[in-house]
Every structure is written in structure tokens, then in C-alpha cells.
Image: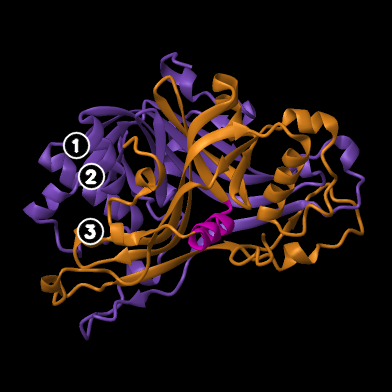
Chain colours: A purple, B orange
Amino acid sequence: MSAPGVARTKVRRHPERGQYDRATIDAILDEALICHVGFVVGGQPYVIPTIHARAGDHVYVHGSAASRMLRTLGAGVPACLTATLLDGLVLARSGFSHSMNYRSVVVLGLATEVTDGAEKLAALEAIVEHVVPGRWAEARLPNEVEMRQTSVLRMPLDEASAKIRTGPPKDAEEDLDLGVWAGVIPLALVPGTPVADPQLRDGIALPEYARSYRIQNRRRTRR
Amino acid sequence: MSAPGVARTKVRRHPERGQYDRATIDAILDEALICHVGFVVGGQPYVIPTIHARAGDHVYVHGSAASRMLRTLGAGVPACLTATLLDGLVLARSGFSHSMNYRSVVVLGLATEVTDGAEKLAALEAIVEHVVPGRWAEARLPNEVEMRQTSVLRMPLDEASAKIRTGPPKDAEEDLDLGVWAGVIPLALVPGTPVADPQLRDGIALPEYARSYRIQNRRRTRR
């Protein structure tokens, strides 16, 4: 369990679902709007949902996920960042073979605080652009007080793996004759019609990046 | 950090978002199709996505989430089970105030293996019914071999909290005059048209629970 490198991220259950190439890993991290970050305090694991962004060979998280971790342990802490996309419900003929179609990434490593001002600002830009491309150029930039109130953590992508299930149910041969419907109910996270802030000033139009917001492939130009 | 009871699950960042009543916690656990389970091996946290189900005062997970944990540590292990529902992207006028609308639950406690056969079968039924209500009665029941291959873990709901953000952006007063659109892009996980297994026998109709599948409120009759 404590072997270095890829050994810790090797997919053990359903090894046929494991993938280790960076293109696959990056695509999942880039599509997922949020991740779940795990860290340990006094032997107790904590798992916190948070917004992330990949930029190059690192993944960044900010704010609440960082706060308890940083307060407690300072510099670098062992962390696990997991991003999961749900693609469908797999209805098999046997209860045992029920599953889900999904794409997930697990990143293991040390989370360290970003202290360099320029890298921190770039990470915050990446996080906002990760969620709504085009937004950073319009929003008011953080001021000094806000920068101090925000903590940003960085994890390298050296130790990461993807796990993917696609396709129809995989029932045992002898179950195929059962009189039970089998197949997949696809799932997708879908944006609705934008709702303007009740305090929105008159005369401000809904921007195109919000009107035509897409979750999939929203970051084609990403580094 | 090591204080017992509600202290560990108290929401510290944005305490106004914290909720501790079981009705709120149960509703989030019941709506979320999957959760992320965190556990620790040799000081390293691992966070694994998995299907769960609440039944009464416990939440159950099965399969892969359990396997590494169980192999490593046996009986009861400190775990954290987190379920998150994404409800919207919050576009504020300042980069700093960007957020998401979400509902999440964090459950802390010892995860223990379910060894009683009847409880284990009931947990597997709850897990399948959690995802697709009505499915368990149709699918082939697990046989002895499958039951041995499946591990089920149980966590009590004694130490749980919910965290919820709703509503429009909360920009600072002095930002309200900026010429920047602000509001919320709602998000929902939406089922698509069911896709039959290519190996499906002729003459088996798509069942009503799959044709009219709903994610929200799919478990009105839940204990």
C-alpha cells in the first residue's frame, strides 16, 4: 500500500476499467465541475466537495477544502482528490451485476499551499474559468484583502489514475434468457435557464457564455 | 478536532450553511445517486466514489469502496461518507464571490462490515432500490457465490451534518453597481432515453420505472 509511484493508484477492483494516460485523466478533471478532496486529521478522514481546476501538471483547489487542512497541518499534507462524472445507470438482469457508467479520476499526493502571489491569482482565474469559461475577464478581480482571505492548494498530477465504465450491462451468460429488461438509463448534468440576481442593475444583458452554457467540452482551448 | 459528537461535523466555513436535522440529512442522502467514501491507509487518504443507500439510521455502501479498506484493516475503520448534489453555478460580480449552489452531507464514523446475512441482503436491496425504485423485485436475486463476493459496509448516522447553499450571489454592497451580469445557472442531473442492452431478448418491454425515471423525489415511500 505504501509503494511509491503508480502502485498506489493502480485500479485493483475491475482493473480493466483503469486508465493511466494524462489525456484521459485531464479530460475527466476538466469536465468535472467539482471534486471531493480527502485529508486526515488525527486519524479521521474528511471528504469535502470543492471546485477545482487543472492547469498544466497540477490541480488546484481553494477555500473551504483547504481551510481545516491548512490550519491543522501547515505545509504539505497527504491528500486525495477524486472527480467523478456520472454517465448512466446500468440495469442488469441480476441484482449483483447492476452498476453505473462513470468516469472518475483519483489523484494522490501532497497538497501544498500556493504562496506565490502570481501563481495564486492564476489558480483563482483557472478555477473560475474552469466553471464558466469567459467569466474571469468580466468579473471584478480580487483585491488584496480577498487574496489574503483565500487559500489555494496545489497537487501534482504525478500520481493519478482514471477509472471508466461504459456500455451495456455485463450479465452472466446463463442470465441472458431471463425475462427482465436490461439496459442503460443515460444521465447528464444539464444547465437550466439562467436566473438573474434580483439586485441586477437595469440594462445588463445576459452574456453569451451564460445563455449557451455547456458543461461538456466547455474547455476546448484549455492548456 | 477529536472532540466527540457533533463537534467534528460542525460546519466551520460558512456556518450559516450548516444544518443538523435528520430530515434534511436524509433527504440529501436519499436524492444523491452516489457518494464519495474516504478512508486512510498508512496515513494516506483515499476517496472512492460508490453507490450508497440509507436505511433507517444507517448508510450502507458495497463493493469496491469497501474492498481495500476491508482487506487492510478488518473490523471497524474511521471513514467519511460525503454526498453532494450540485444545484447551480453562482455568478457574482466579483471573482471572489463566485460560488455554487449545492446540498451536501458529511457522515463521520466507524465503517463496519455487515456480516449478518439478512442485513446484508436487505442492504443490497436498499442499494439497488436507492438507484432505481422498483428494480429489486424484477432482478434475479443474488446467489450464494455472489453474496460471498460482495462486501457491505455500514456507517451510523450519529455524526452527520448537511451544508446547503441556495439563492443568488452575495456580492458586497459596493459591487452591486458594477456593469457585470450576476445570477445563477441552475444545474440538474437529468436522465435520458433508456438504451436497451443489445443482447436483450425479444418481447421484453421497457418497464415503467425506467421509462419515467426521475432522480428527484424517487423515494417518497422510503423508510
- Label 1 close to label 2 by CB (< 8 Å): yes
Q: Chain under label 1? A: A
Could you give the CA–CA distance between mark 1 and mark 2, rounded to whole angstroms? Answer: 9 Å
Q: Which mark is residue A123?
A: 2
- Residues rendered magenta in the picture: B22-33
Q: Is residue B23 magenta?
A: yes
- Binning the other alpha carbons within 10 Å of mark 3 as few (below 14), some (14 to 19) or many (20 upward) gives some
A203 versus B108 height, above or below: below
List the single residue furthest toward the front. B4
Image coordinates of residue B47 in percent, x first then y, are 47, 35
- For marks 3 and 1, give the one nearer the viewer: 1
In the rendered image, which quarter is residue B217 located in?
Answer: bottom right
Residue closer to the observer: A84 or B108? B108
Classify residue B181 as left or right of residue B210.
Answer: left
Can residue A168 be spotted in the picture?
A: no
Residue type at numbered disc 3: Trp
Q: Would you say A102 lies left or right of B134 here?
A: left
| Marks 3/1: CA–CA distance | 20 Å
- Numbered mark located on residue A136 in the image: 3
| Quarter of the image with the N terminus of chain B in it | top left
Secondary structure, magenta segment, majority class: helix
Can you see residue B163?
A: yes
Q: Which residue is mark 1?
A: A114
Identify the chain of the residue marked 3, using the numbered disc in the image.
A
The answer to whether residue B208 is above or below residue A86 is: below
Kindly identify the amino acid type of the residue bearing the numbered disc 2: Ala
Measuring from the top left, give residue A162's x and y in whole percent. Answer: 50, 34
Which kind of residue does numbered mark 1 sit on? Val
Chain letter of disc 2 in the image: A
SS class, disc 2:
helix
